[in-house]
Image (cartoon, rainbow, N blue to C red):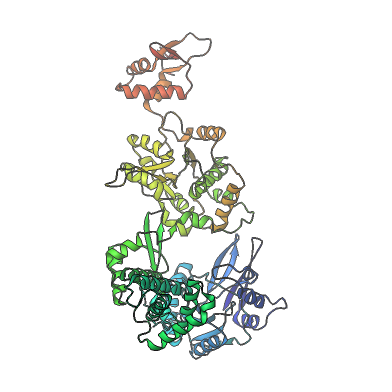
């Protein structure tokens, strides 16, 4: 059984594997450079939420599987069934020692040691199937590991006095290399037996145990730091002191007595009351007098922390805010235009949309804790500025690592076998344009109006390739289902999705071609919400890609500069792993350094020339070249209007004549650069008719 160790430096990934005995010696003896000790020392002076750069000097340890490096990407070689649990954060050595001792008492514990931060404890335990086998395929291993992690949490949590820090169980879940001379290792630990699950576990939640607050301040104003709580309670007590009838007079002594009484009932410690009272009155020289008054009030009064000076609405608002932040994570997803949530301290790692059932559940959870909240109160809180804004596309793009310099966009384009020599270059340009739209740096006057169009036989994995362009984290913003007959919904898709695949492009009817042209070049989305008068301008994120099994599918007679058409000659290699972080880091790097992402006239000319083989030839055009030809410069020929040419062609076919058909035919003649001149009778074209026999 081997585990994996990763080290990243200057964009280069180094991978090594080791057995558990060797790993144990690594964490029991620190190298001369003392990297773990240096990390722990610097971490002591790092503010919460800030990143400690010393952590990057420690290699990542992946206990779940042995990985190998292929094309710069880690691939699972062997799953070993080890699950890592993290307990903490812990306050010090005594708590760490207690957790290690309690974990070691469990016969299933294979390894327990202090985490690299010095504030957590890592517990490793092993799982296997009833026949002592382990999954061989990655898909099976992911499902098995997710269930194993849940079972490990449920078995260990009741034995420990501190919370297990829940993490989404993935095969690549890692921790940093640690140092613990007192690490304990049991090579013959008892394994958990788990039958191979059929699917990923559901989102069943286990409830966190409600613990009584020990300090009056956190109980009176939960969710606030102690300093903020004191300020809020003192100001409320001060306001109440001045607002109530002054039966004892309004002298400074009487006001101080009443203020001290309200502070006492609000649960403010005596010393805090003294300090804030004389600071409020700027009577530093009277500190002894104020202290004596407050001391007398606190000694004589009864009912400490029984009557807060906050009014009913303030208290409910504070309780609501504390309850929501303690039990849930909320975010307003600008991409879908709605609030998403997940329960904290639960196995719900992914955000889900909020519906009526969710609102009712949150209200019932609050009422079970004694907080008088109704679903309308929950809605008022959720759909307010209390909820932070979240843009998934920008969040992904601006959290990418530095590009390592390897051209992955070109390599991705070359996985598509075709005979178009310009494909890779044009795909690169289109990919940059797509990313530029995602991050919102494009000019609102222009849209990514160009779309790759992959044409090939069934089974060449065209749709799979299109889907693989989007990182797994953003797959919710990819769709291959768009109905152009529902125009309003189709326009809203420009804001809702990041990439739209027009699957079976040849199924788009001729009546929808005009709307398709409109939506491809529409730079913003203009929409009016129901029952509203104002028209909102919404940002466009979507780019388009398309697939088809038929080759003759372009019908626009004025040209095909909006499509990068290629014929897929063989099955696309979609099994090659994609390093999405580096793929998109390259795009961000190139955009930041001024790489052109728009198509110029030269690009459009190349696309138009290469798209001739994919164009539908209308019957009118076929008949024209059968019975007419373009007149040469030294030929007399005839000057005929498009209607006259069509009228002559009717002698050879039963083709009906209409105004629309005449206009379309005129554009066909212009596309083929038939010599023309403008007269008072309209546009005339210089042609020669084959009188004797067709050409």
Quarter of image, res 21? bottom right
**Residue 348 vertical placement versus 625 (above, below):** below
Question: Which is nearer the eye, 465 or 214?
Answer: 214
Image quarter hosting the N terminus: bottom right
Which residue shows up at 34% across the image and 82% down it? 306
Locate residue 157, reporting x and y percent: 43, 83
**Residue 226 vertical placement versus 655 (above, below):** below
Quarter of image, res 206? bottom left
Which residue shows up at 57% across the image and 54% down it? 585
Question: Which is nearer the eye, 468 or 635?
Answer: 468
Q: Is 28 displayed left or right of 397 in the figure?
A: right
Locate residue 327, reporting x and y percent: 38, 72
Residue 391 visible in the shown view: yes
Quarter of image, res 75? bottom right
**Residue 353 vertical placement versus 344 (above, below):** above
Q: So how many labels did they put on this image?
A: 0
Q: Is 289 displayed left or right of 209 in the figure?
A: right
Residue 89 visible in the shown view: no
Q: Residue furthest top?
A: 636
Locate residue 394, reporting x and y percent: 49, 54
Q: Residue furthest right?
A: 32
Locate residue 685, reporting x and y percent: 44, 15
**Residue 450 vertical placement versus 152 (above, below):** above
Image quarter hosting the C terminus: top left
Question: Which is nearer the eye, 561 or 358?
Answer: 358
Q: Is 4 displayed left or right of 641 in the figure?
A: right
């Amino acid at each position: 059984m081997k585990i994996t160790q990763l080290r990243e430096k200057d964009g280069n990934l180094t991978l090594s594997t080791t057995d558990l005995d060797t790993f144990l010696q690594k964490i029991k003896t620190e190298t001369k450079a003392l990297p773990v000790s240096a990390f722990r020392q610097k971490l002591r002076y790092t503010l919460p939420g800030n990143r400690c750069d010393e952590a990057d000097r420690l290699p990542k340890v992946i206990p779940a599987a042995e990985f190998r490096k292929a094309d710069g990407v880690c691939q699972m070689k062997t799953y070993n069934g080890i699950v890592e649990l993290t307990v903490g954060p812990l306050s010090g050595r005594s708590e760490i020692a207690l957790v290690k001792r309690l974990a070691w008492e469990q016969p299933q514990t294979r390894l327990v040691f202090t985490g690299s931060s010095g504030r957590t404890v890592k517990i490793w335990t092993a799982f296997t199937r009833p026949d002592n086998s382990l999954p061989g395929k990655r898909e099976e291993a992911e499902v098995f590991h997710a269930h194993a992690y849940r079972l490990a949490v449920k078995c260990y949590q009741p034995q420990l006095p501190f919370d297990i820090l829940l993490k989404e169980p993935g095969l690549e879940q890692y921790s940093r290399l640690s140092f613990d001379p007192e690490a304990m290792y049991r090579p013959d630990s008892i394994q958990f037996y788990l039958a191979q699950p059929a699917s990923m576990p559901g989102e069943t939640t286990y409830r966190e145990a409600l613990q009584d607050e020990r300090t009056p301040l956190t109980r009176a104003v939960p969710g606030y730091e102690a300093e903020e709580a004191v300020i809020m309670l003192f100001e409320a007590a001060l306001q109440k002191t001045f607002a109530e009838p002054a039966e004892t007079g309004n002298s400074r002594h009487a006001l101080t007595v009443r203020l001290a009484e309200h502070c006492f009932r609000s649960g403010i410690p005596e010393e805090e009351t003294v300090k804030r009272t004389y600071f409020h009155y700027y009577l530093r020289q009277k500190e002894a007098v104020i202290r004596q008054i407050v001391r007398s009030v606190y000694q004589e009064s009864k009912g400490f922390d029984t009557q807060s000076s906050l009014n009913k609405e303030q208290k409910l608002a504070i309780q609501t805010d504390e309850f929501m932040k303690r039990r849930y994570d909320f975010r307003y997803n600008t991409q879908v235009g709605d609030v998403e949530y997940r329960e904290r301290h639960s196995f719900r790692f992914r955000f889900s949309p909020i519906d009526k059932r969710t609102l009712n559940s949150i209200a019932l959870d609050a009422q079970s804790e004694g907080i008088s909240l109704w679903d309308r109160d929950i809605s008022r809180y959720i759909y307010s500025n209390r909820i932070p804004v979240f843009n998934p596309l920008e969040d992904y793009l601006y959290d990418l690592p530095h590009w390592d310099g390897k051209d992955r966009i070109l390599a991705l384009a070359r996985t598509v076998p075709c005979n178009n020599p310009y494909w890779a270059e044009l795909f690169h340009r289109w990919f940059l344009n797509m990313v530029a739209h995602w991050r919102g740096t494009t000019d609102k006057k222009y849209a990514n109006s160009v779309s790759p169009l992959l044409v090939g036989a069934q089974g060449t994995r065209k749709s799979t390739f299109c889907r693989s362009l989007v990182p797994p984290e953003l797959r919710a913003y990819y769709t291959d289902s768009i109905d152009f007959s529902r125009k309003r919904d189709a326009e809203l898709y420009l804001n809702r999705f990041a990439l739209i695949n027009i699957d079976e492009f040849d199924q788009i009817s001729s009546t929808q071609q005009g709307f398709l042209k409109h939506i491809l070049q529409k730079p913003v989305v203009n929409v009016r919400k129901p029952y509203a008068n104002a028209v909102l301008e919404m940002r466009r994120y979507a780019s388009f890609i398309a697939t088809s099994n038929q080759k003759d599918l372009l019908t626009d007679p004025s040209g095909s500069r909006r499509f990068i058409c290629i014929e897929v000659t063989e099955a696309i290699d979609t099994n090659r792993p994609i390093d999405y972080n580096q793929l998109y880091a390259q795009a961000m790097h190139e955009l930041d350094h001024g790489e052109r992402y728009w198509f110029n006239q030269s690009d459009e000319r190349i696309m138009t020339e290469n798209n001739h083989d994919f164009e539908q030839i209308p019957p009118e055009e076929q008949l024209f070249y059968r019975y007419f030809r373009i007149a040469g410069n030294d030929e007399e020929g005839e000057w005929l209007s498009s209607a006259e040419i069509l009228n002559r062609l009717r002698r050879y076919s039963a083709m009906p004549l209409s105004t629309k058909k005449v206009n379309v035919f005129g554009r066909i003649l212009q596309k083929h650069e038939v010599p023309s001149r403008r007269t008072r009778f309209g546009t005339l074209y210089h042609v020669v008719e084959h009188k004797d026999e067709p050409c």
